[in-house]
Image: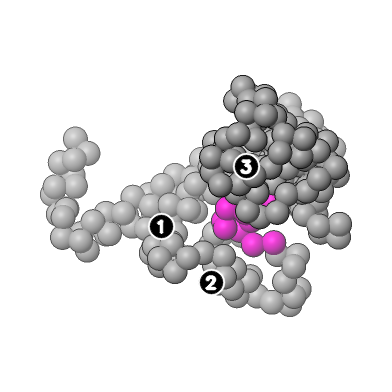
Amino acid sequence: MTQPAERVGQAVAELRRLRGYTTRSLSDRLAELGCRIPASSISKVEVGKRTVDPNELVALAIALRTTPNRLLFGPHAGINAVALTPEVATTGHRAWAWANAEFPLTSTYPRDMPAIEVSEDFARHALPVDFRLRRSHPAARAARRLAALVDNLVMFLTTDGADTPWDFLPVPGDTTTFRRRDPALGRDQLELVDVDPAAVVAQALTRTEREVHDLLEEAGGVSGETAEDGKA
């Protein structure tokens, strides 16, 4: 498994070529942003002979019109293992979810810590206050649950190989998920077990619609009659 510094180098090389930069022109662009990295040093970054500091990481992301997360975690998520430190690894899917403040690295918390406390602690320390307040609204929670269910279903249907505990992210407020009956089964033989995916997603959609309607009514902008008219 590659370490973060190696992935940054690979991403810089890939995106530099995609954007049509030479190491010299990328160096010039970085200088315009107030970050001086010589062309020779960019070459060293790309082959893993030089690391970048946080200021340089952000400047490279801006210059390459991407994000620091893309430089750190690569172009693919999925269930392949990703090293975060020499001693901590997770799947690409979870690494991206953690970096985007969507889901904590549960393995870094005490094993006996309740899941709800883990989620609350992570949100408290990973999100800005205004983001946290918005995400705590029932309508926002319902929307995230619906999105997570659809995401899990898509991932289930498009992933080859054996099932592992890391395949799918837990759905907020829900302990069920879509999983394979037998880890040895291939994609053509996958079965949805424990839940009816269509019913679960439909139920989440209904809940989200109700919460959004309630939110609009709280704001005084939509009456029940107006909402029905909007559907027509």
Q: In this figure, which residue is indicated by the disc labeled 2?
A: 124
Position of 127 compared to 194: left or right?
Answer: left
Against 104, residue 51 (above or below) is above
Find residue 46 and report its image quarter: top right
How far across and down, in percent of the image, does residue 176 sit? 62, 55
> Which quadrant is home to the N terminus?
top right
Q: In this figure, which residue is indicated by the disc labeled 3?
A: 60
Going by the numbered disc 1, the residue's amino acid type is Ala
State the SS at label 2: helix
Question: Residue at horizontal 60%, vertical 25%?
Answer: 19
Going by the numbered disc 3, the residue's amino acid type is Leu
How packed mark 2 is, by other alpha carbons closer than 10 Å (few <14, some 14-19, many 20 or more), is: few
Going by the numbered disc 2, the residue's amino acid type is Arg
> Which quadrant is home to the C terminus?
top left
State the SS at label 1: helix
Question: Residue at horizontal 40%, vertical 65%?
Answer: 130
The Cα atoms of the two marked residues, 3 and 2, are separated by 29 Å
Mark toward the viewer: 1 or 3:
3
Q: In this figure, which residue is indicated by the disc labeled 1?
A: 140
Single out the residue that lies furthest toward the top: 20
Q: What are the residue bounds of the magenta stretch?
A: 93-105
How far across and down, in percent of the image, does residue 161 sit? 80, 35
